[in-house]
Amino acid sequence: MVRFSIRSLLLLGIVSAAPALAQQQDRAIDRSKPLGLSFTTGADYSVGDYGAAANTKILLVPFSLRATTGRLRLSATLPWLRIDGPGYIVGGAEGGPIVIDPNSPAPRTVRSGIGDVTFGATYGLLQQDKAGIDLDIGARVKLPTASRSKGLSTGKTDVSVSADISRSFGNVTPFVTLGYRMPGDPTGFDLKNSASVSVGSSFVAGKSVVIVSYDYSGRTSAFSDPSHSLFGALAVPVTKRITLTGYGTAGLSNGAPDYGVGMLLTLKAL
């Protein structure tokens, strides 16, 4: 039987405003296969002021490759991004944009280029058929491949860990995702370690999957606020190998974008 996990049609850690989406594809994997391979791309657009006077608009185009063998899932993601906003808003990869100092003289600019690359690994520690729940543990490393001079990166390596707990009741799968992010220590930045929590559920409707969640992330810098947001997504298989996912977010705090929308296309190679 196909098992729908919550970490899915995503590219690990790229759509930072939607941690629930990061699980959906893994549960769609047939773990009886010795090897699974998939590629995901799409576009993510968000708008928010992050507590500042002016809005920042961010367009992100991710390219993600995922390999699965047994309980182990590996991923590599490289995004292209465009930031239209004040210079004190800096790209932060999976942690979202970082507010350096809203009181600094930083005129509005438009910056674009390759973002930071992220490598991830997730292992299925417990399975529902044996332990009563699914428990996945994971770790990700973000390497500073983007330009710090353009404000697309902090220029340092970040590390994050996560635990995903879920249990299926027929076509409904409630889940809780816990995470902790440890950023590097770049000169001129006052970055903070931050925890994250995502609580929600996925629903199987025929061949499609609906995901809804509430997402929280702690503040990433001394000048940012915690992020609270609502998330919803619909994943629809186009063919046996292609899945299309549309999603949206609504911010509930200054630390989150006011709104975000995105579309992802996943191609299963194996």
Image (cartoon, grey):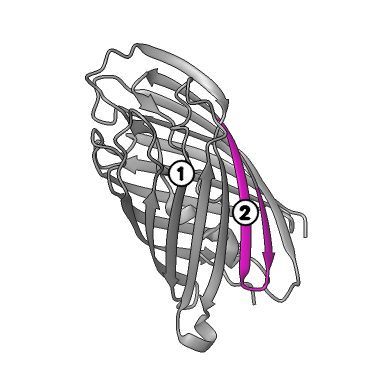
Instruction: Say which label, 1 or 2, has the lower sequence index.
Output: 2
Toward the viewer: 11 or 137?
Answer: 137
The local secondary structure at tag 2 comes to: strand
Where does the magenta region start and end? Answer: 65-80
Residue at (40% x, 67% y) in the render: 175
Asked if one can make out residue 208 in the rendered structure from this viewpoint, the answer is no
User: Where does the C terminus fall, quadrant-wise?
Assistant: bottom right
Q: Residues within 10 Å of mark 2 (few under 14, many from 20)?
A: many
Q: Which mark is residue 75?
A: 2
Q: Is residue 241 above or below residue 157?
A: below
Q: Is residue 150 above or below residue 35?
A: above
Point out the residue furthest to the bottom here. Answer: 130
Rendering coords of residue 90 (x, y %): 40, 28
Toward the viewer: 270 or 204?
Answer: 270
Q: Is residue 262 left or right of residue 181?
A: right
Asked if one can make out residue 110 in the rendered structure from this viewpoint, the answer is yes
The local secondary structure at tag 1 comes to: helix
